[in-house]
Amino acid sequence: MTRSLQLMLLMGKVVPVPAPAVLVDALQSVQVTSSSGSASGFQLAFAVSKRSPLTEVMLPTGLLDPKTRVVVVAVVAGVPHVLMDGVITRQEMNPGQAPGSSTLTVTGEDLSLLMDLRHVERCYPGLPHHLRVMLVCTGYAQYGIVPLAVPPVISSLPNPAVEVPVQSATDLAYLRALADEVGYVFFIEPGPAPGVSIAYWGPEIRAGLPQPALTVDSGAADNVESLSFSFDGLSHTQYTARFVEPVAKTQQTVPVPDVSLLHPPLALRPAPALREEPLTGQTDRPLAETLLCGLSRSAHSADAVTGQGKLDVLRYGHVLSARNLVGVRGAGLTYDGLYYVRSVTHDIARGAYKQSFTLTRDALVSNMPVVVP
């Protein structure tokens, strides 16, 4: 357990700097939501009055205008965690009926919003998926965004003499479409330092050192407030691909590769695929692209086990991060083990730091005898 909690707030148009002290003093609560494969969001609530510096100076001068950059950093037990690097999209003023009850709420999204503001027409002759991603992301280097793109598990190099990939969408829509084609995700992860972010395009990170374990039903060792699990037997679907063999001109049916190419198994008993469906919309596409599409759809349906829970960060002693692994102990052999943290919502108020989270994995029964750390 730790009782050390501090919050840092940085703001700016392009380069964030420490927010004015009067603004930090007026901050009442912070909520940040992070999720795999989608944009993150934040909400800041400030206490205001008719004569406060926020209403008389900061709002009129545009300090909290839309597209202003905001960085939120939580310092827990002396360790900084960048929770959000985003831009403001909305303001809401709620004048109270009693003195001291007026609030100003500022809402925003992570830096991926900047990639969704302008429609782009661009072609990429001869470039594979991951190089296209790198090229798109270099246009946002001024915001401290560093691209990290993982090559697809099945290679598909476009032939410029036959096909030239064309972008006719916003950069964000194009990056997400490329990720969907190969079973990957795209998101912007804030940190590791304030003002720097990683634009990640690749498979969900289901390997590496897990975060400190979540402990339930263990008496004084419990470090979560609640945690429950569900198993959806209809979630997993087996897809088959049909293609025309170019020499004999005969139609062949090929099973889509196992989803473990993208998602290493986190437990021993995989959920059976009770449904079997053919891939649609793949006519005249190369076999490699068809299999990548099938792998993508299989990945989206593979996680049949879900956990929902809440914790107090000051008791847990750490900040649980989305898009990484975490262990669970105390739930029994079937549901103990490693999970992928699908989403986390951070709720911070003065003296309190709570988190709500969603865990997922593709199988039952832990594949490890002991959960560590």
Image: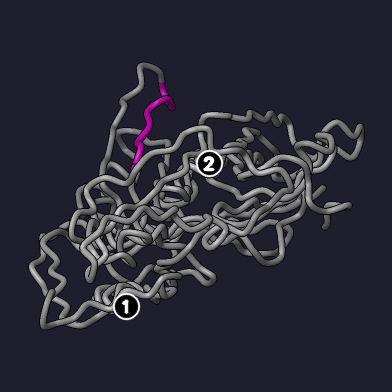
**Which amino acid type is marked by label 1?**
Met
Whole-percent x and y of residue 363? 66, 43
Closer to us: mark 1 or mark 2? 1
User: Residue at 52% of width from left, 29% of height from top?
Assistant: 234
Determine if the magenta segment contains residue 102.
yes
User: Residue at 51% of width from left, 59% of height from top?
Assistant: 204
Whole-percent x and y of residue 93? 28, 32
Q: Earlier in the sequence, mark 1 or mark 2?
A: 1
Answer with left or right where residue 62 lies relative to residue 96: left
Q: CA distance from mark 1 to mark 2?
A: 29 Å
- Count of numbered circles in the view: 2
- Asked if the residues shown at circle 1 and circle 2 are in contact, with their CB atoms under 8 angstroms apart, the answer is no
Whole-percent x and y of residue 265? 65, 54
Give the magenta range.
Answer: 99-107
The residue wearing badge 2 is 345
Is residue 27 visible from the viewing direction of this image?
A: no
The local crowd at label 1, few if under 14, some if 14 to 19, many if 20 or more residues have their Cα within 10 Å, is some
Of helix, strand and loop, which one carries label 1?
helix
Residue 145 location, quadrant: bottom left
**Which amino acid type is marked by label 2?**
Thr
Q: Nearer the viewer, residue 286 or 326?
A: 286
For residue 306, which numbered disc appears in the image? Answer: none
Relative to 291, residue 49 above or below: above
For residue 134, which numbered disc appears in the image? Answer: 1
Residue 264 location, quadrant: bottom right
Whole-percent x and y of residue 373? 82, 57
The local crowd at label 2, few if under 14, some if 14 to 19, many if 20 or more residues have their Cα within 10 Å, is many
Of helix, strand and loop, which one carries label 2?
strand
Residue 56 location, quadrant: top left
Q: Nearer the viewer, residue 71 or 335?
A: 335
User: Residue at 39% of width from left, 46% of height from top?
Assistant: 41
Answer with left or right where residue 111 lies relative to residue 269: left
